[in-house]
Image (cartoon, rainbow, N blue to C red):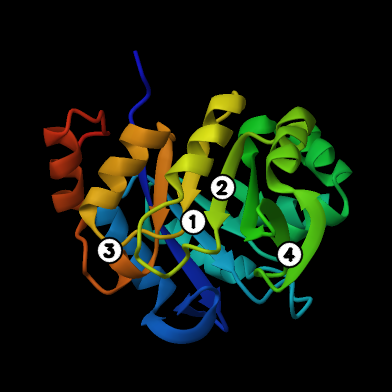
């Protein structure tokens, strides 16, 4: 039996507010993260992801207080990322109520961090987020909210991350992010076919059909989006109804 596909709203948090931009810039306010979390939980979201988008850039630790507030309000799993550089950071977030942590720039700079976290907390706890962009015909890993290109090819890095103990891959196509032109289904399929862990598609959701397409064409385990949910362009119950009509297995509406 195939696992049900997951719908995951993503809340990019800056200075305690939810924000959204296009291609990671031009940020605008999208509301209080705790209120949004509560709302999504009630709408039938399967999980949530919170990313403190300036944590790495500004060398700030992720907000433990936010995690506590969210954990008090919702009963669906949630992942938190941004500025997690060591076991102690992850430990604090887990103790505050997060279900999983997401690492990105820190893992690229110190790949052994993936091994350490997986060993300390278990593979299912560790989500490796990868921001990718096309550069000269190749998919290249970018750091610090997409500001810094690396030498790493995205496909190779994802395989290494899985090998080191990543429990899930959250793959954001920065060329698609915020454009609402659909997910990068071709590359997502290539990655999903190659790994044995769940892949979460991110970057490009603009309409309900984009979710149908990413599940049908790339067969990813989950699809993540931000602005289409934050601004009410897509309501999760409506989205799940259409997925069901397309014979895509989803978790039951709450």
Identify whether 187 is placed above or below 36: above
User: Closer to the N terminus: mark 1 or mark 4?
Assistant: 1
Which residue is the site of mark 3? 39
Q: For numbered disc 2, what is the local secondary structure?
A: strand
Label 3 Cα neighbours within 10 Å, binned few <14 / some 14-19 / many ≥20: some
Which residue is the site of mark 4? 143
- Given residues 139 and 108, the one toward you in this image is 139
Q: In this view, does 78 lie to the left or right of 237?
A: right
Q: How far apart are marks 3 and 4 (CA)?
A: 31 Å
At which x and y percent is residue 250?
26, 33
Q: For numbered disc 3, what is the local secondary structure?
A: helix
Q: How far apart are marks 1 and 4 (CA)?
A: 18 Å
Which residue is the site of mark 2? 170
Q: Distance between the residues labelled 2 and 3?
A: 23 Å
At which x and y percent is residue 175?
53, 64
Quarter that holds the C terminus: top left
Can the viewer see residue 22 in this picture?
A: yes
* Disc nearest the viewer among 2 and 3: 2
Can the viewer see residue 253 in this picture?
A: no
């Amino acid at each position: 039996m195939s696992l049900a596909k997951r719908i995951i709203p993503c809340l990019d948090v800056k200075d305690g507010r939810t924000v959204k931009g296009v291609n990671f810039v031009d940020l605008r306010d999208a509301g209080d993260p705790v209120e949004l979390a509560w709302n999504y939980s009630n709408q039938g979201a399967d999980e949530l992801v919170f990313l403190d988008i300036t944590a790495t850039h500004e060398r700030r630790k992720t907000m433990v207080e936010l995690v506590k507030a969210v954990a008090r309000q919702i009963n669906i799993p949630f992942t938190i990322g941004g500025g997690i550089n060591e076991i102690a950071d992850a430990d604090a977030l887990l103790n505050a109520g997060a279900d999983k942590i997401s690492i990105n720039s820190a893992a690229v700079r110190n790949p052994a961090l993936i091994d350490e976290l997986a060993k300390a907390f278990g593979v299912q706890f560790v989500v490796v987020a990868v921001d990718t962009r096309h550069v000269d015909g190749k998919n290249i890993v970018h750091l610090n909210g997409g500001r810094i290109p690396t030498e790493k090819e995205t496909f190779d890095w994802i395989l290494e991350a899985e090998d080191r103990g990543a429990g899930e891959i959250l793959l954001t196509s920065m060329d698609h992010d915020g454009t609402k032109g659909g997910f990068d289904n071709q590359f997502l399929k290539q990655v999903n076919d190659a790994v044995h862990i769940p892949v979460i598609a991110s970057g490009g959701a603009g309409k309900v059909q984009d979710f149908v397409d990413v599940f049908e064409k790339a067969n990813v385990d989950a699809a993540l989006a931000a602005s289409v949910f934050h601004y009410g362009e897509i309501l999760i119950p409506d989205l799940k109804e259409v997925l069901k009509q397309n014979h895509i297995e989803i978790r039951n509406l709450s």
